[in-house]
Amino acid sequence: MRTPWLCAVALVGLAAAVRAEDGPPEPPAGRRVPTADVGKPYVGIRWERDFDEGMRRAAKEGRGVYLCENGRVEEGEGGTTMLWRAYQGADLGAATAGLVCFVVNATGHATVKAGREEVCARYGCGTCAAHRAASAFVMARFSADQSIVSPSHFLLDPDGRAVYQGEYMQSALSTSDLEAWFVRLSPRHALRSVWGAREARTSALGKAETAAKLQELATAWIASKDPMAAAGVVATLEQETDDARRKALFAALATAGPDALPVVWDAVDGVATDPDVDPVATAAWLATAARLDAVFGTWALTRALARTRATPADLTARCTAAGFPPASDAPGAEALRAEGAVLAAARAPKPDAAATDAALRHLEPAARAAGWPDARLAWIRAVCGKKTPVDLLSAGRDDVCRALLQLTPDEAKAAKAKLVGYLGDAVEEVRVAAAVALRRAGDPAGADVLLKAIEDPVEGPEVRWALTKLAGDDRGDTAGAWEEFVRAGGAK
Amino acid sequence: MSRAHALLFVAVLAAAVAAVPVARAEDDAVTAAGAALVEAAKSRDAGRVAAALEAADALVGPGASFPTRADLADWLGGLPDAVTSLDVVKVRRAWLYVAGKRGKDAVPLLDAALAKDPKNTLLRSYLGEAKRQTGDLAGAMEAWKAALEAGAPDDQVLPSVRRLVYDLHQEREKDPADALPRYATVAAPLLAMRPMADVEEALYDWLVYDALMARPDAARVARLRTEAARHVAVAARGTIPEGDRTRVARKALEAGQFVAGLASAPDDVPTAFDLFAAAVRLGQVAGAEGHEVPEALTALAEAALAKGRFVLAAAMARRRLAISDSPAARRVLEAVPADVGD
């Protein structure tokens, strides 16, 4: 039987209807699209395979994001030789290992197998889906007019903020630049990875026979301007138990300057938060912090003084003995010292009103010179029991909250009806401020508001802070732990 | 004629006959249905009338007596007055027209029914849908609003509102270039009464996309993105399934970052602080450490710092640093008063 003509027509039609799925665009006639040499293992910047996953990983792991846009560079051999130099090689691969890296290109390409993975043939690494998604991101984020200079380079911090951007090929970051950014953006990773990245240097430090030799090696390393040097010295210091060798390392570290701040931050913050755990270490870290940067060191010392159970004079003397430099006259440092003096005066066992007022009068001009916001001064005044006037005519919700939180217990009692009205406000922070004011006055009328707020991630921290001050102890972050106190009313 | 040619001729003829539309002539089933309705109407037995209408419904379908529901409605309208004058038949016809996408024919029937039964929310909902089909969007909104105010359950009204918004998005090319797209504004009164998180999120996505396409017109970009921020704030306040919370959190964060960059914003635009707060709340995972959107913690820390909410700023910065490195979170901690935190 003759083949039904309809079937034949259908088959022909189907064949005609089949079209290629979204394949790579054809290269311009006469030009060969360069591909990575997938005969050899890829060595260079490792491009991510999934854009969304890479960005999530950057935030979750605290890594910077390096975006290399080159989509409009001619897809011909001559235009891309420079690209391969800028992105390939063992040094660049090592320097970017701590970052999340995306090549940025809106064009799809063929794929090839590299090991067990399918990779973009143009780049030899990563996927077309990732580099196209990166392109959409860059265009949305950095282009005001749907165009962008190509090539361009961008660096984001772990929270996605742009910290660097540059145009043309010279904006591609060198290995030294990349390592410096890595240390600045991800100091914790830098402290872990420096052992491998600078094995010879760290090994030499470990083998130094005397403290003097150790200090000499560490100081020389820092003086070499190696971006990883400070990380290497801090990492060694954190593992060193001998007092003399620790002192030598601190002395070397102090020569590093402000570039070392990221890698010392956690250690300094730790001793500033709990200065009495190891007074010797506290003094050493605080002194080092101040030698690296006067304002940072003063910040840390002021925090430590506000928390130590030792006398301020003792802690200050230990820090001076450890090498804390003389008081800096930098505006930020001056203001921090003045703030510390106000806090100390206000918290003295027998507060002296005159001394507190004098300290406040000294703080105010220093704070303005340092560019501190009014809110910070208002906070310190509140610590001293002083109110900051609120202009009711122009008061926004922040001012209303501040006014409510400034109420004394007697004022709150007198304004109870008004405060109870605020418990029904549309804005939660106003409701919470009213409830706190009532509870300070011993009135449990806002108990439900407080108990709901204490488990809220946004309102909870301040409610817990206020209740802890009232109760004299911190009962935790659950409503159940605070219910009895909140509903009981009255004083502590 | 060869056997093969004969078979081919028969096949072509059968196809030709099958291709002719079925005439809505009085075939046996239709005749029986009509008779049943007339008898039921004469008997004044509501149950019999209802049963007869159901039986007629069964005659609707491709290749059946009535290809569409609207065709059935037309046929019902041609029956004797004893049938067509019944309220239940009028309402059925109206519903059939609406279901058959011929709202224009449904409107007079529904108006008449509502004149007798003004509190009937189902009819009011149908009227809204009928007016939507005729392009009378203001009339549709009015009817749906009235239905909701009279106590209509959400599922009588909201599916139609959702459909309207999506249809307007499909037709956005017709919107004037200097105004907000209709998909973002027409349903606003109803969305204010009954927020629908999925619709609000879709509005956010569409407005952000349209803003991207509007570049380099910076004013229009700002207008669209500001409107987008309003919608994501509503979405973030709604009931969001567990699996969708992180996605909405990221959008709230993104919107907050845009609002934070505005020199000034109208009073009805959510603040960056509120958007970041929403992102932090949505990114919490109950019973789990960490946070699904760590960047939101940093953003809220900075916004809290700017408001002088130092305890909150420090708490958010500490939470961020407990997850991983964040230079921005460290800067926040360096800017809070010395007695705050821990």
Image: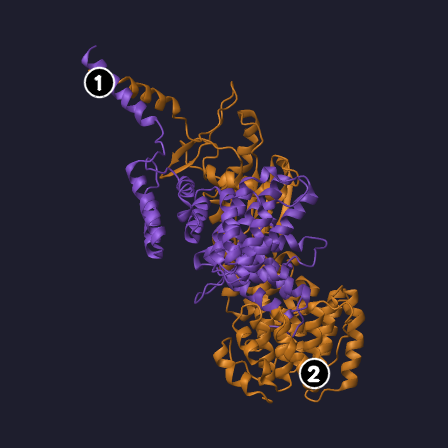
Chain colours: A orange, B purple
Residue A56 lies left or right of residue A164; in this view the side is left
| Residue that protrudes farthest toward the top in the picture | B1
Q: Position of residue B301 (x, y in %)?
A: 61, 63
Q: Choose between B49 and A210: the one closer to the eye.
A: B49
Above or below: residue A8 compared with residue A367: above
* Element carrying mark 1: helix
Q: Specify the subunit that label 2 lies on.
A: A
Q: Nearer the viewer, residue B92 or A390?
A: B92
The residue at 48%/24% (across/down) is A26
Q: Is residue A11 visible?
A: yes
**Frontmost residue, A377 versus B79:** B79
User: Tag 1: residue type?
Assistant: Leu
Which quarter of the figure has residue B218? top right
B324 over B89 or under it: above or below: below
Q: Position of residue B143 (x, y in %)?
A: 55, 53
Residue at image point 23% right, 13% down: B5
Determine the chain carrying the residue at label 1. Answer: B
> Which residue is disc 1 drawn over?
B7
Q: Are marks 1 and 2 in contact (CB under 8 Å)?
A: no
Q: Estimate the spatial distance between the alpha carbons at disc 1 and disc 2, rounded to whole Å.
A: 99 Å
* Element type at mark 2: loop
Expressed as whole percent of the image width and height from the top left, the position of residue B134 reads: 54, 42
Of A281 and B307, nearer the camera is B307
Q: Which disc, if any, is residue A415?
A: 2
Residue A409 quadrant = bottom right
Report the mark closest to the observer, 1 or 2. Answer: 1
Quarter of the image that includes the C terminus of chain A: bottom right
Q: Residues within 10 Å of mark 2 (few under 14, many from 20)?
A: some
Q: Amino acid at mark 2?
A: Ala
Q: Residue at coordinates 68% horizontally, 88% vertically from top-left? A: A349
Q: Position of residue A57 (x, y in %)?
A: 48, 52
